[in-house]
Each structure stands twice: as structure tokens, then as C-alpha cells.
Amino acid sequence: MKTINVNKTCRIAVFSLACCLAAPSWADDLNRGEWGVRYESQAVMQKELVKGCVRDQNGEPLIGVTVRVQGTSQGTITDIDGNYSLALPSKQTKLEFSFIGYNTVVLTPGSRNSLDVTLEEDVKALDEVVVVGYGTMKKRDLVGAVDHINSEALEGRSTPSLTRSLQGQIPNLNISMRDGKPDRGASYNIRGTTSIGAGGEALILIDGVEGDPNSVNPQDIESVSVLKDASSAAVYGARGTFGVVLITTKNAQKGGVKVNYNGSFSFSQRTVEPDLVTNGLQWTDDFVEAFVNNKGTMPTSINNIFPYTPEWHEELRRHDANPDLPKVQINENTGQYEYFGNTDWDKLLYKDVTAGTDHSISITGGNDIANFYVSGRFFSQDGIYRANTDDYQRGNFRAKGSIKIKPWLSIDNNFDMMHKTYHYPLISYDQTLNIQRNMEQQGFPMAVMYNPDGSLTYSAVYCAVGDFYNESSYQDQTTLQYKNTFGVNITPIKDVLKFRGDFTYVNTAYKRNRVLNYVPYSTGPEQFAEKGKSLMMDNKDETRYMAANLNGTWTPKLGENHALSVMGGWNLETSNKDTFYSERDGFLFPDRPNYDLMDGLNYKLEQGDKNWSYVGVFYRLNYGYKGRYLIETSGRYDGSSKFPVNEMWGFFPSASAA
């Protein structure tokens, strides 16, 4: 008769099921900064081998416990029976045993070859409440892959936006930006590659409403949850395909009135500066050598703009040997200026130090009947350019409060307003800020900024540095957004049955004014010209967004061994965006940009709109047995106006167990 070890077989089944359903979650845990473990196959030459078994408080083996040499990346994980073995440099090496939901233990083997360990549950961590889709749950009851940080992780960071505060805080939340502009939006990606070609970003909800993290005061944040897998994000339907980021703002605190102020002044300096050749002769020698090696002939110009002749090259050599000679002289044959400079265009363009300031204040208070939370923030960041510099300013205001009308009825309101302005220079002849490309093409150190008559040189205008010093081409953009959410909470049966309904209205007004002016320069005495455009463009967008939610949660009392939670709800969202664009050329007075003071015949007027709607019903069911075996199923039936009628509706279910 063949004997079967039932306990071991059960553990194998559970382990296999956990691998299938929660492997992505394990992957996140292993990627956490505090784990920092690298597992690799290697030939072990040390003789100090330590073995043992890791169990919980009930004596059950723990699978997947990280065992590592403290302070290093050398480690392993326990197998299905909780066993491990690890080669150590010496028996005095400290071993660290860590597992999610349990307190970390550090031990020294000493003279022992066998080291058994018992890990105790981290009750505080497991009882921590985490925001999930349309509700909250304790960490111990989570089945899906959910990561969570609270306000403590964000405090003390003087950054222009919440997005920058979140960078590097949550495993597998990849935040990327194209550049360092203070108002630059970001791409929120969860777990890497999404779809082939089409891409895809996470859905971001602020207090349950879709929004831009850059519009929120970072000091107002209470917590951020990231729903990473289908199990946790299914209640958001198709929009949760690439994960969901849930941002929750702070609520009022009961008790006396409390005032909190945070202020900072900061100075920023570049940590890395390019090592540029700023000697005109050295740059020219290198250019000629490279050109001859490539083409086999001597150049007649540098990048088709800057004139080159062997005679000029020799004259440059003479000027380099005698710094007292003028950097600009007139060519007797052409009557144009010739240049013999050693110009550091990078130094002329960028400041050495930039300044910023950040001030936040919050006032909170209340009692069991009513409470309030009011906050404000002003953030300002100076630009990086020496002339016509960019300037960013943003202000936030928030007012939250709730009133308990009856023991079973309460109402709450959340008002939020954001205003920001951003000014930055433009290159007049291509309507962009792509200055680095222009610097690489025409920022020759032989050229100089000004001619003897005080006019700009052609190279200065072409490489855009002179264009900035002219201070006549720029873009001003302004955003004003206000949002209000009104909610009603009904609790017919305390701790068993509750309902919530809320309505949100968001209005966002965006204005952009772009002004381009000709930039004068001269190539010789009395030889003046202009480069660029005489043009003004205006964009005006207004978006009106409305959302309504209604959901209920039932958590019956089923005794010690059983826990059940059923949530269901309905969601409706609509958005209407109106756009207007105008453009005209021909300034009569370049320093007075106004359509009434323009005479150009080229103009453009465009008007449009963009509307969409979502509607959906959703559910989530959680069951737990003895706090050890967990099952969760959730789903959403979604409808979207963005799809054709025959593809407008879809059902998105999910189930998981642990």
C-alpha cells in the first residue's frame, strides 16, 4: 500500500495555485527596494553551509521567505517545505529572514549548522487599511496585487508636482517624462510593456474621479494605491486594463483646530555639465580634420552657414596666439564681418543657479458631528535661461468637510481649485524650444554674440541664444481648474450595510498665447536683416466633466471563521470639451501683441468640440476562511461612446484566490 502525505500534497496544491494567481504580486514584492535580493546560480566555494526551516507562529512551513546575508545581495528563498540552505563566508555572518506580512528577523548562526526560525505576523502592517476600487480593505484580506504608500513617504519633498514626488516610491510604477519642464505631464506605466504598438497608461483617479496628478497639492495627499493586476482593477472595466492609480486626499481630523505650515526656499544647480570645446581654433582644427578625412577635400563653409577659407583659418590662428586682437573684423573683399571668438554659448544660455519657493498651509478641526479641512499652496520655480527666462507658478486651494445629520446619515463636500501660469521663450523661426539642436548646428565657438555696432550676429540668432536675448518670442499658458464633489453616506445597519452616492463637476479652462517676432541681425556694417516670423496664435479650451457614483457594501456577521463582503455599484461619466484656435501674422508694433494691431492677410480661425460618455455597473465579492484562505471575484459591465454601437458594451470579470 502506498502512503500519501496529505499535508504536503495540500501545500503543493496551494503553492501551485498561488504561483498561478499571484505570481505578478510576488514579482512586485521581490522588486521592492527593501528586499534588494538577486538570485543566481553560482559555484559556492565556502565551506560554512547553514540549513534550516522557517515556520510561522502555528508551526506551518512558510514558502518563499527571503533569506539573505545582511547588507549583501547573496540570498535564497525557502522551498515548499519552508527549508533553505545557504553558504556563508563565516558562521559570524548575520542572516536576515523577511517575508511580506511578517516581522523581519536577523540571526547569527554562530557554531550551529542548522538554524530554524519562527516568523511572527506583523499585525500592524496586516491591519493597515488600503484604498481599493470603490472601497477599502485591510492588507491581510488583499488577494490582488496592490501596492500602497501613505503621506509619510511624500512629506518633506519640495517638488513642483505629485508626479515627481511619486517617482521611485512604488515598485513597478514607472513614471517617465519627456523633459524637465515643471508643468510636464507624465506617463504612468505599471509593469512595463502594455500593448504592441498602441501603448497604454494606467487609469488615475483622485478621490474617485479621473484627474491629473499634477493638479493636486502634494501636501494634501493621504495615500496612493496602485492596482496592478486584473483581480484588483476589474471593477474599472476596460479603462483599468493597464492598471489603476488611486490617489486619496487628506480628511479632517477630530479635535481642536490644528494649523500646519510647510515652507521652503530651494536653489538648484546642474549636477552634470557638458564638456564643450570653447576655443575657436581647436574647434576649427578638429572640424577641418574630420571633414577632410570624410570628404577628401577642404571645406568651403561650416554647416553651410559659417564661411570658411584657408586664409580665415590662418587669421584665426593668429588671433588665438594674440588675445589682444579684436574678435570681430571686416573682410576687405566682402565687406562683411569675420569672427575669431572663443564663445561658450552654453554659458551664455543657462544660469548657474536657479531658485524656487514652496509654501503650504492647512487648517483642520471638528468633532463627532462636523469637521473641516482647508489647505492652500503656492509654488514658484525660476527658469534655467539667462534671458527671457521661463517662469512657473502654481496655486492650490482645497476645502473639505462633512456633517453627520443622523447616526445613519452624513453628507460631505470636497472643493478643489488649481491655477497655474507658465511663461517660456520660443525660437522665433521654428515656433519651438528645441534649442539644443540649434546649438549643435550653429553654436560655433568662433562666432560671437554681438557685432561692433551692437547688433546680433547671424550665428547668435540661428543658434537661438541671441533670439532669447532679444526677448520678443515667447509662450504664455494659463490653466484654471475647479472641482467639487458632493457625497451622501447612508448606513442602515452599522458595520453591516452601507451606501454611498456622490456627484462631481469639474471645469478646466486652458489658454495659450504664442508670440513670434522677427529678430534683427547684421552681417556687416549697414547690412541688416531679420530672421523669424511675425505671428501670434491663441488656443482656448474649456472642458466640463461630470461624474456620478452609487455603490453599496454588505458585510454580514458570519462568525469567527468566515468573512464575507459584497460590493456593487453604478458609475456614469460625461465630458464635453470646446476648442478654439486663432492665428494671424503682421505685427504693426512688435511690443504690443494684439490682433487689432496687426495687418497681415494670413489668418486662421478654427473651432471644435470633443464629447464622450461612460456608464457601467460593477461588483466585487470577497470571502475569507479563518483569515488564511481568501477568494475574490469582481467585474464590470461597461459601455463607452468612444466605440461603435456594435462594440460599445463589454463585460470584464476576474477571479483570484490565495
Image (cartoon, grey):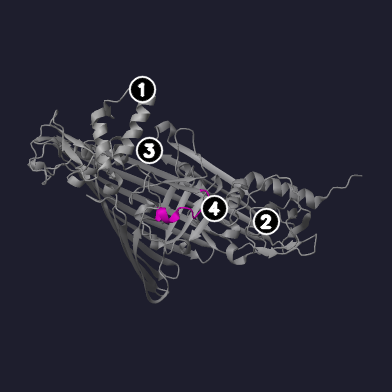
User: In the current view of this chain or complex, which residue is farthest to the bottom?
Assistant: 256
Q: Is residue 226 left or right of residue 322?
A: right
Does residue 601 lie above or below 394 as drawn? above
Which residue is denoted by mark 3 in the rendering?
Answer: 641
Residue at mark 1 to residue at mark 4: CA–CA distance: 60 Å
Q: Residues within 10 Å of mark 4 (few under 14, many from 20)?
A: many
Residue at mark 2 to residue at mark 1: CA–CA distance: 60 Å
Which residue is denoted by mark 4 in the rendering?
Answer: 146
Under mark 4, the amino acid is Val
Under mark 2, the amino acid is Arg
Give the tally of numbered discs.
4
Q: Residues within 10 Å of mark 1 (few under 14, many from 20)?
A: few
Give coordinates of residue 576: x percent, y percent: 29, 44
Which residue is denoted by mark 1 in the rendering?
Answer: 295
Single out the mark in the foreground, 1 or 4: 1
Q: Out of 112 and 235, give the one closest to the viewer.
A: 112
Residue 608 sits inside the magenta stretch: no
The span picked out in magenta is: 162-172
Give coordinates of residue 219: x percent, y percent: 39, 63
Single out the mark in the foreground, 3 or 2: 2
Under mark 3, the amino acid is Ser
Circle nearer the N terminus (3, 2): 2
